[in-house]
């Protein structure tokens, strides 16, 4: 089942996405700033998974119900994510393998197949959330029915193909551009909402009532449970290898340093956006007596009359659309990485991405036709439950690999890092389990 003594070849060329492997040049003898700019990009693509439409409902519910109190939960969740993504960087850079390839090499074939199936289900569930989120945004902005909006989301597969054919940097730039749009939209929303800065700072300090108040704890678990996306762990460990750094210990050490800085700064940007959603809900809904708002549609229709600003709701929907499109691009890319890594099966890129998209679009389309917006909302909740189940099957192997000296060599986790990582992983897994139990029963 697990080959603890199997040594990995640290100079192995990646079999996953060979068209972009080591395709981005890293300047030699350049300043740290120029090197960082060359390494920057993968962190932004990972960060979109932390601000996807699946997170919006919990952030809105947390802000409208309890004001700024749960800001500390978003901050803690983000710190957990920063550490786990650092481990992904280490795995990809130090071993030349992404998480899918590492699982295939370390586990027996039956175990690898099971892990692959679980991961494909999780990616489809995540894609399902993004498809529904994008379709809701299209409906809110243009009045296009949900079913037609779901079909329209298939077109972003063509965008992904076009950008990747031009070069991985173009894809990263497109994703970064959409994140910038989301950032600007929420910066605008916060400026007109004028939240209390003292209350925001106070909300960043953890409170014991988060644990003692059952309703608050439930939403806190939802925020934490929806933060770490399992497909991000596979994605990051692969796309960090798009950089053409020197495959020596010194080169890998430098790559880990700059790639970790890239992901850390990108995840702090994701923290700002997630926190902005909760702050907006707290300042606009909670303090105006609308403590029951937990739905994206309700938030859209209430923002404009409560703020008294014409474009408040439009900017909210634009950010949602950008968030959904960003997440679908990276989720589809993760699907390719997982299939190639676990099975070493290489389909034509357009076919692989079309399959991934159809797996998400078909159930969303059927449910929206039969049950309308309410059914789509329930499907969104189901997708988060599926992600909760899959998470431990991605986190545990990641920690096993990066704490194994035989496989990681000089880049194995330190004892302190290992203890912190296992504590964080245990907390995330337990809370996801609690959320899963509460959702089902």
Image (spheres, grey):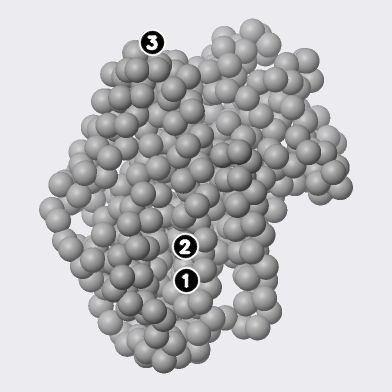
Q: In the image, 97: left or right of 384?
A: left
* Residue 140, quarter of picture: top left
**Disc 2 target residue:** 393
Pointer 2: residues within 10 angstroms few (<14), some, or many (20+)? some
Q: Is residue 287 above or below residue 324?
A: above
Q: Secondary structure at mark 2?
A: helix
Q: Is residue 285 above or below residue 87?
A: above
- Residue drawn 39% across the image and 79% down it: 1
Q: In the image, 38: left or right of 74?
A: left
Mark 1 to mark 3: distance in Å?
Answer: 45 Å
Residue 440: % across, % down: 56, 39
- Residue drawn 60% across the image and 58% down it: 429
Q: Secondary structure at mark 3?
A: loop
- Residue drawn 64% across the image and 57% down it: 430
Mark 2 to mark 3: distance in Å?
Answer: 40 Å
* Residue 198, quarter of picture: top right
Q: Are marks 1 and 2 in contact (CB under 8 Å)?
A: yes
Q: Where the C terminus falls, by quadrant? A: top right
**Disc 1 target residue:** 397
Q: Is residue 83 above or below residue 75?
A: below
Q: Residue furthest front?
A: 441
Residue 64: % across, % down: 71, 25
Pointer 1: residues within 10 angstroms few (<14), some, or many (20+)? some
**Disc 3 target residue:** 143
Q: Secondary structure at mark 1?
A: helix
- Residue drawn 63% across the image and 70% down it: 422
């Amino acid at each position: 089942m697990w080959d603890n003594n199997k040594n990995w070849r640290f100079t192995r060329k990646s079999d996953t996405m060979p068209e972009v492997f080591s395709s981005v040049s890293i300047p030699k003898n350049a300043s740290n700033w120029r090197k960082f700019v060359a390494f920057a990009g993968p962190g932004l693509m990972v960060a979109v998974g932390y601000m996807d439409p699946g997170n919006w409902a919990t952030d809105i519910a947390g802000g409208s119900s309890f004001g700024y109190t749960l800001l500390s939960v978003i901050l803690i969740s983000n710190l957990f994510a920063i550490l786990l993504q650092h481990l992904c960087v280490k795995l990809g850079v130090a071993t030349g393998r992404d998480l899918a390839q590492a699982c295939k090499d370390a586990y027996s074939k039956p175990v690898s197949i099971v892990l692959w199936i679980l991961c494909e289900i999780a990616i489809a569930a995540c894609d399902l959330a993004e498809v529904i989120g994008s379709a809701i945004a299209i409906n809110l902005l243009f009045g296009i029915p949900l079913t037609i909006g779901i079909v329209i989301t298939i077109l972003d597969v063509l965008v992904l193909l076009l950008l990747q054919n031009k070069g991985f940097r173009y894809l990263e730039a497109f994703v970064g551009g959409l994140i910038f749009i989301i950032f600007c939209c929420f910066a605008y929303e916060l400026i007109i909402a004028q939240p209390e800065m003292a209350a925001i700072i106070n909300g960043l300090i953890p409170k014991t009532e988060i644990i003692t108040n059952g309703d608050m704890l439930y939403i806190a678990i939802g925020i934490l449970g929806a933060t770490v996306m399992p497909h991000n762990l596979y994605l990051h460990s692969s796309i960090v290898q798009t950089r053409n750094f020197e495959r020596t210990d010194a080169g890998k050490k430098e790559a880990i340093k700059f790639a970790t800085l890239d992901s850390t700064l990108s995840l702090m940007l994701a923290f700002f956006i997630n926190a902005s959603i909760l702050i907006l809900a707290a300042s606009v809904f909670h303090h105006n007596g609308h403590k029951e708002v937990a739905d994206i549609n309700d938030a859209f229709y209430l923002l404009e009359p409560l703020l008294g600003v014409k474009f408040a709701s439009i900017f909210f929907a634009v950010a949602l659309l950008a968030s959904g499109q960003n997440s679908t691009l990276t989720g589809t890319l993760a699907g390719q990485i997982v299939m190639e890594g676990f099975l070493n099966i290489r389909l034509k890129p357009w076919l692989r991405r079309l399959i991934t998209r159809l797996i998400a679009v078909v159930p969303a389309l059927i449910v929206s036709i039969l049950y309308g917006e309410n059914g789509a909302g329930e499907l969104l909740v189901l997708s988060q439950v599926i992600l909760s189940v899959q998470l431990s099957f991605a986190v545990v192997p990641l920690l096993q690999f990066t704490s194994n000296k035989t496989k990681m060599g000089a880049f194995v986790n330190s004892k302190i890092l290992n203890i912190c990582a296992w504590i964080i992983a245990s907390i995330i897994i337990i809370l996801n389990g609690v959320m899963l139990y509460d959702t089902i029963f």
